[in-house]
Image: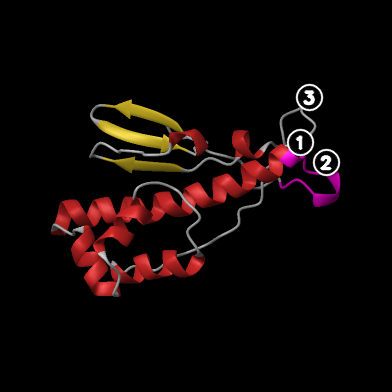
Amino acid sequence: MTIELDRTAVMPLNAAPPLSPEDLDDACFRARDRAWAAVYGEFLDREEAEGLTYAALGERINKPRSQIHRWMSGPSNLSIASLGLLAEGMNADLEISLLPRSIPDAGRNHAHPLEDAVATVISKKPLVFTNTSSFKMKIIKYNGIVALEV
């Protein structure tokens, strides 16, 4: 299922309500989860295509296998520097972009981030999570493909 958002009509910032503490927490978790999912998705692709291992990636960026395992085990407080190291170790570029949210449907007073900002990660291998209590994700399985909706 593909979700397409109308990005032509952007909500003016002065029309959006102040963010609640829950919205602020959601924003932090969502950014962290998306960054990790992008790096982990790239690792899974490289693992399948090239046989990349945690040990090989760690050797490439001068980090122990155990550190790579911790970073790849699930979203955590990865720094931009750590994300950059992992991306560089996989010979990939880390891209960060901001997408303005669309104007909400009639009757809603604002565009909630969890409803209007969707990121999907697709993997052909089973995904294993160690600390699922902090996730703000929905796991979808379809025809042997696992997708995470963040």
* Quadrant of residue 127 within the rendered picture: top left
Which one is in front, 39 or 74?
Answer: 74
Q: Which residues are magenta?
A: 10-21
Q: Which residue is mark 1?
A: 110
Q: Amino acid at mark 2?
A: Pro
CB within 8 Å, label 1 to label 3: no
Q: Amino acid at mark 1?
A: His
Residue at disc 1, secondary structure: loop
Image location (x, y in percent) of residue 121: 39, 43
State the separation of the CA atoms marked 3 and 2: 14 Å
Q: Amino acid at mark 3?
A: Gly
**Magenta residue check for 64:** no
How packed is label 1: few (under 14 Cα within 10 Å), some, or many (20 or more)?
some
Residue at disc 3, secondary structure: loop
Q: Which residue is mark 2?
A: 17
**Left or right: where does residue 79 sit relative to residue 8?**
left
The residue at 63%/46% (across/down) is 27
**Left or right: where does residue 107 sit relative to residue 56?**
right
The residue at 50%/66% (across/down) is 80
Image location (x, y in percent) of residue 77: 51, 55
Residue 103 shows up from this direction: no
